[in-house]
Image: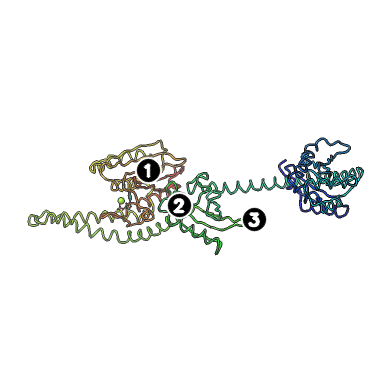
Amino acid sequence: MKYKFSEIFDIPKLQKLMEGLYLASGIPSAIIDIDGNILVAVAWQNICTKFHRVNIETELSCRQSDQYLKEHLRERGSIVPYIYYTCPNGLIDAAAPIIINGEHLASIFNGQFLFEKPDIEKFRNQARKYGFDEEKYLKELVNVPIYSKDKLDSIMHYFLQLAEMLGEMGVDRFRLIESQNKVLEESEARLKTIINNTPNVAIQSYDEDGKILFVNKASETIFGWVSEEIVGKTLDQLNWSKENAANMNKFKDLLESCKTRKPYKAFESIYINKQRIKKNIFTTLFPINLFGGKREFISIDIDITEKKRFEKEMKRLDQLNIIGQMAAGIGHEIRNPMTTVRGYLQLLQNRVELQAFKSQFKLMIDEIDRANSIITEFLTLAKTKPTKTEVCKCNLNELISKLFPLIQADTFTQNKQIIFEPGEIPQIHLNTKEIRQLILNLCRNGLEAMKADGCLTLKTYKDGQNVVLSVRDEGIGIPIENLDMLGKPFFTTKDIGTGLGLANCYNIATRHKAKIDINTGLNGTTFFVTFNSNCESSAQCLSS
Ligand code: ADP
Ligand code: MG
């Protein structure tokens, strides 16, 4: 049996019931469970509680009596289904078992009593023997009820009927508890499944001390810690990277203020998770009150990284649009006069009388070329559509192979290495001119980030429906605070950088409905460009 007698029955009510019986009929009683716990005790005789159970020797006799009844309960007959016993102290106890669902859970006792008037002399001697106050002892003896064997039969039959009825009630209650528990278990299991499998919504619960009690699967995916690693620990005990320190402190402060002040908090933050992936998180924190006055704190975190990326992309495209319009408007106007100036400079630098200024002429022409290349890149930004004729279905590996010698030459002159590892990939729709530009820009950045001997690795591979191009360098990495700036026109950390290379790459990727991801650290940076190979026509694949 899963339950104890005291879990199935309302013990205070039983106590009242038996007290009522005593008041009406003078019948003392007790219910003791199978483990020996006294659950109900009514009118135990003072002669026992104040004398027999107080003296060490007589108490031993009391225990003998308890033991006898316990051991012999099974021997009761079916006609007289109870047993009785006269204890060595001279009083009688009777007992019957309460059976629930075939199991003996408790026993009901009647006692102590006598069958006939007591032998006063015997009790007087007993008082002397054990040093009881004779007068008080004999006074209590008078209170012990006396009934005949027939009366005991009828009392015990009544008790048994009561026990039987209690047993049946117990079984009913037991079944009710079982079925209620089953319903509860089912609904708990359903809730757990829902909470555990809710995608993209991380749910954790914390206790009052900030200890993590539960995390769902989405939590494991977003933050990178599996349940076994973190349950039972506080946030301080987890090995968060330094960049999260401010966030952690903020979260802990909010947890504290949730306990005392306004109970509901919502905020946005950026985490670097265990796998060092940057995540934008929207958190809602609130307390819940549980049974018994217990409180837990629930944190619901929504991964809004993609949303943020989309917002950023929209903002960037807006900026590009403005720049594009500007570029289209003034680019040509600047380039034309510059071509004239460059032409004259070239002409003049060959004049004999100006040979003394040859190096200055070279410098001026180089500077004009540089300005011109900036304007060229600037003008590419203005372009929003690839011209139809430039788009074709082709293999990225072939395109890279053709471009490879060019990049290799550049690499070797800088004493660096380059590797190309082509993977098995399907053909995809590409604007070859633009993708060539994208690859060159990424390679150029990779090379510029590395010291001599560094190695640049280009790879292509298939990832589900997607074709991925990765460009990995062994350079200095990109500081976290700069990550958000990448792709913004004119953002550069280089003395002679234009800050337009990545802006162009993002622009080209957007036109190809491709995505650029970055993984960066102290050992280098990898740019991933992910194309969807599933587009059947160029119109579908390339934004119009
Ligand atoms: P530029 O190369 O002219 O500076 P880009 O738009 O190509 O402009 O790059 C912008 C900035 O991004 C660079 O100045 C550099 O700080 C950073 N960056 C880009 N690629 C890398 C890389 N592979 N490693 C380190 N930093 C990089
Ligand atoms: Mg660059």
Query: How far, Cα to Cα, is label 2 from label 1?
Result: 21 Å
Which residue is more in the foreground, 34 or 259? 34
With 341 as the anchor, is 22 left or right in this view?
A: right
Q: Indicate the amino acid at tag 1.
A: Ser
Q: Indicate the amino acid at tag 2.
A: Lys
Which residue is more in the foreground, 379 or 245? 245
Q: How many marks?
A: 3
Which residue is labeled 3 in the image? 292
With 312 as the anchor, is 445 left or right in this view?
A: left
Q: Determine the secondary structure under disc 1.
A: strand
Q: Determine the secondary structure under disc 2.
A: strand
Which residue is labeled 1 in the image? 470
Question: How far across and down, in percent of the image, does residue 119 sit?
Answer: 88, 45
Q: Earlier in the sequence, mark 2 or mark 1?
A: 2
Quarter in which the N terminus is drawn: top right
Question: How far across and down, in percent of the image, does residue 154 sit?
Answer: 90, 45
Q: Residues within 10 Å of mark 3 (few under 14, many from 20)?
A: few
Query: How far, Cα to Cα, is label 2 from label 3?
Result: 37 Å
Which residue is labeled 2 in the image? 279
Q: Nearer the viewer, mark 2 or mark 1?
A: 2
* Residue closest to the far left: 353
Query: How far, Cα to Cα, is label 3 from label 1?
Result: 56 Å
